[in-house]
Structures are given as structure tokens and as C-alpha cells.
Image (spheres, rainbow, N blue to C red):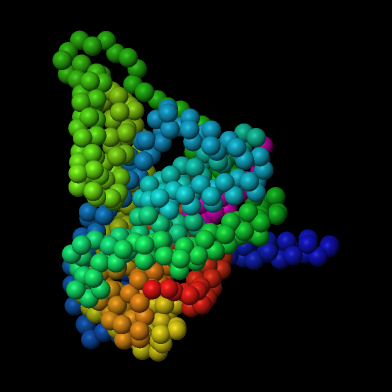
Amino acid sequence: MNGHEANSQSKKKLTDYFTEFAERWVPDSYVIALVLSIVAFLLAAIFTPNNPYKIVQAWGKGFWTLLEFSMQMALIVITGYALATTPLCKNLIVTVCSKPKSAPQVYLWAVIISAIGYYLNWGFGLVFAALITKELARQAAKKGILVDYRFLCGASWTTFYIWHMGLSGSAPLLVATANHFMVKEIGVISITQTIFHPYNLILTGVSVLAIILLFWKILLPTDAAKIKTFADLRPDLAKDEKIETVQNVKITTPSEWFTYSPWFSYLIGIMFLVYLYYHFVELGKSLDINVLNFIFLMLIIFLYKRPADLIKAIKSSTSASWGVILQFPFYAGIFGIMKFTGLVDTLSKWVISFSTEFTFPAIAAMLTAVIGYFIPSGGSKWVIEAPFLIPAGHALGVADAKTIIAYMFGGDLVALVQPFFAVPFMAVTGLEFKDFVGYSFVAFIVLGIIMFLGLTFIPFAV
């Protein structure tokens, strides 16, 4: 065995180790939510003065706080899936995914395309990356290209790491909004100081390059006997998805005319267009999760034309949202424990106590990663952390924008090993978190090191 082969063998064993560990020990994503609930309860019991009864009260108080977000995410999955299965979108996705000619190219394609989707908008990217992943696997199978579907999902999921640094980042968009909740403390901070600041752009670019190298060159599956294809893991999904529409029917009643005529869809679609003009042009507002769902609904109304076809498509895609509906209330309960028992403040004060101006950004990022494992949210978590991160940064002489960028990276890093945001992705790809977290965990380690060094040593010009 030459040096290159030995090196490949060692890399294979490393990824195999993490994958086998995940398959053996990482439970279903719903069970993870239950385990984290118990862990949060125990931490609150140990590190806060609350008794068990008070902790349960905090848990129940938070349990329904993510209902709006849960509905938003459910609609993202349902409408995104329905949109992707329209004949027009299906043909476009097939065309794009038929380009790779080898397994490394398939993995590279998955990283690049999913990264673009996540950077543009995290909600859109979740469904878009999952649909691209499935189609890349199908097209590879047609060409006889041996692709490990778990590794492919790991590649597509890992690029979720960059979403908060992109155009839909919750914290930078929030602080760029007039009258945000911290405006008295930090004023309005333009996205040129956060999303488009060289400090963020350089570290994001280096991170994407690292992900490309990991999944295109370094971590490639080398043992064909251990590769599990899409057909091996989900034969029910591996077949081409046929676009089924309601057959033409003989209209004999007014109700049938309403159901099978496209004219009402066109009229409602025009109303959607008019409102979008009002939102973007007259109000000058940007894209958010609600507007994204609004656009998805408009597109499927236009593309399916007949209400009967749209109804059929929505019924077919609704089953993909079950994980969101079941799991998100439990994460909201964890949020309640962390916030209403004061546990988040206890952990934060302990970590910040040994920070300096030089180390604060990296330590703040690691802190928000720890908190993010229990409160996996970009926007609502910022509301919890900003009141102590910003004053701590002030006391140490750290620029507010730099603190915000550190928060962005830390919150995104933990997503690679936490299944909360992966629920819609899993629903569409048809895999469980344990199937691909072994690969994203390797990236978690590499990107964590890059993040720590980058936040510490990349110059930040105010």
C-alpha cells in the first residue's frame, strides 16, 4: 500500500467511526428533543435556585412560543415541495442535477448548489437543498455512478452553516431595522457592517472552501462495499417522481366548474402580485420567511392553475411536515426552561467572566453555540443573548458589529450537530439525522477550528 492509499484508508476509517457511532448511538430526532428537554431540566435544577415545580412551569410557559415559527416552517416544507413537483420546476431541477459525471462531481455539485440556496434564504435553502440532493442521487443512479446517499446528504446539510452569514441572517437584519429592541444600546447597524463586512465575508469564504475540500476531496467514501445508495436506503423515494394531475372531468355542476377552472387561481394570483409590489416597492421591505411562503403559494397557484391540481399536490406534500409539527413545541419548552429559569444568564456570566478583548469574539461564538444546542433559533435566541453579549463587548472594547458576527457564526456551527433546523431537510430527503450527522460532525470540528481562529485573528476594521 503506497502513502496515498494509506492516507485514504485512515480518512475512511475516521469517517466510518463517526458514522457508525451515530448510527449506533444517535436516536431519532424526536427522541433527541426529549433528551434535550431532560438535560435542560437537570441543568436548571443544578445551576439555578428554581425547584422542579418552577422548572416545569417555565417549560410549559415556553411550550407554545414557537407556534408561529412552526407554522412558517411547515408551510416552507409543504409549499416548497409542491412547487418543486410542478412540471416546470421538476424539469429545471432534473436538468441541473444531470450535469455531474462522477461521484466527486455529484458531491461538489451538492455543496455548491445548496450553499447558494442557503446564502440567499435559509428557509428556501432547506427545501431547495433537500430536493437537489434527492435528484442528484436519482440522476447518478441512472448514469451508473456509485454515490453514498448519506454522504451526499451530509454534504448538502453542512453548507447550512453559512445561512446566518447570508442575505437572510436574522440578527444582522434585525439590528439593521429601525426601532429594533436594542436600538438604544447600539443604534441601527447597517448590513454593510455585518453581512457585507470583510470580517464576515473572508471567514465565510474560507469556511465554504473548507466544506468543498472536505466533501469533494478529503472525506470521499472509498470502500464501495460500505456505500449505501439512495435505492438502498429509501427505495420508495428513489424512483422518479411522476407529476400527477387531476384528469379532465366532465363539468356538470357549478361547484365542479369552480374546482376545475383556472380562472379563480389567476385572479387570486394577481392579488398576490399586487401585494408583493406593495411590500417590496412601496414599503421597501426585504424578503423574510412570511414573504417567502407568500411567494411559494403564489407560484404554485399559478403553476398548478386548477384548484383541483393544487389540492392534490398539497395533500401529497403535507406528510413531509410531520417532524416540524411534532418536535418544535418541545424545543419551545426547552427555550422556556433556559429563559424563564435564568439558566441562560448563569451560563453566560460564567463564560464571559474569563474573556478579554482579544478572545471575546471566539468565546462569545462558542457560548452561543452551547446555548444554541438548547435554543436552536437564530432570531429569538438573539433576543435572549444580546442583552448580555452587547454590554460584555462594550466593557471589553469590542465593536458591536464584531460581536454580532461572532454570534452569527456560533449559532450556525451548532446546527451541524443539532437536528432542529434539519427537520424539514430530513423530511424531504427521507433520512434520519443519525444517517448523515457523522459526516457533518467531522465538518463541525474543522469549521469550529476555522471559526475560532478566524474570529480571533482576522482584522476587524470599524
165 and 95: which one is in front?
165
12 above or below 153?
A: below
Q: How far from the left and from the top, in percent, is residue 144?
A: 67, 37
Give me the residue at 54% from left, 73% from top. Answer: 449
Q: Residue 412's image quarter?
A: bottom left
Between residues 410 and 375, which one lies in front from this camera angle?
410
Residue sitting at the far bottom: 354
Q: Residue furthest front?
A: 462
User: Would you identify the image quadrant in which residue 307 lies?
Assistant: top left
Tell me which residue sits at (28%, 30%) in the image: 301
Number of numbered callouts drawn: 0
Q: Is 323 placed left or right of 332 in the picture? A: right
For the magenta stretch, what is the residue range?
Answer: 144-157
Q: Position of residue 3 (x, y in %)?
A: 81, 65
Up/down of 250 relative to 451, above or below = above
Relative side of 92 to 6, left or right: left
Q: Residue furthest left?
A: 254
Task: Identify the image quadrant of residue 355.
Answer: bottom left
Left or right for 183, reference 449? left
Would you say residue 145 sits in the magenta stretch?
yes
Residue 30 visible to an observer of this rendering: no
